[in-house]
Amino acid sequence: MASRLSLLAVLTVLTVGCSSAIQQLGDNSQTDGGATDAGTSVDGSVDAGCQPASSPSCSPPPPKCAGTDAGCEATFGDLAEGGSSSFGTGLLFGAPVQITTAITVSRLAIVTTGTGKRARLAIYASDSAGEPSTWMASALPSVNLVVGHNEFAINDPPATTPVLLTTGKYWVFVTVEATTEVAQNGPIGPVRYASWSPWNKAFPTTLSPATVAFTEDNLVPVETYVVGDP
């Protein structure tokens, strides 16, 4: 029975069997409470780093910390805090996210329950079977993880090459430099994971059995999400 299986245990099984952050939102940040796959709009007015979300042009308008030039943004994935599991280095872990409004992706994020070293995230489009396939963008920060919501700017490709995500199913993948406690609070769902060493090697442009030997499973996924401008 697969559920909130420790990702450190997953890494053990695999082992035996075989660039700048724009934002880091800690526990004292105002955040949208709960998971969402429908998208969360964020108002652009800022007060001490957190937005009151008062603009009528943003709907729905829950409060959320964001950058000073955020404007109205859409967020897809799981923002909820709660639950915890050890995520070990040497593991590439991915879960699907449904993008319901076309966006220019600006940040990828992971929710953690403990501090850690660096993380790397990438988003992939799905193939016709719904499996992760085509690399779209990566966030490769140079700073360490903090407790809470860690949002990292897309820097591959660079900001001069914006990446449009049309509506559809995507996959967010993450790998960490050192074992980190991560939030796991959602329902059991499909995930993909594989051994990944060194932890900071380049994400392949195409995911296939020839490039990454994934294990398919159903687990409570690591909480990750996508932020972008509609």
Image: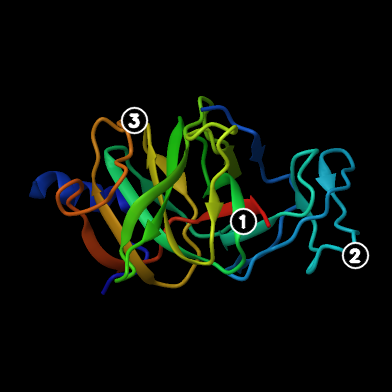
Nearest the eye: 144 or 139? 139
In the picture, the disc for residue 200 is 3
Along the polypeptide, which appears first: circle 3 or circle 2?
2
* Residue sitting farthest toward the front: 161
Q: In the image, 35: left or right of 142?
A: right
| Circle nearer the N terminus (1, 3) | 1
**Please, what is the three-letter code of the amino acid marked with disc 2?**
Pro
Q: What x and y, as percent, mark residue 109?
A: 55, 47
Q: Which is more foreground, mark 3 or mark 2?
A: 2
Q: Residue furthest top?
A: 142
Q: Which residue is under mark 2?
A: 56
Q: Which residue is mark 1?
A: 103
Location of residue 168 in the rendering, given as x and y in whole percent from the top left corner: 48, 68
Q: CA distance from mark 2 to mark 1?
A: 20 Å
Does residue 45 sit above or below 62 in this rendering?
A: above
Image quadrant occupied by the N terminus:
bottom left
The residue drawn where x is 34% and y is 30% is 200
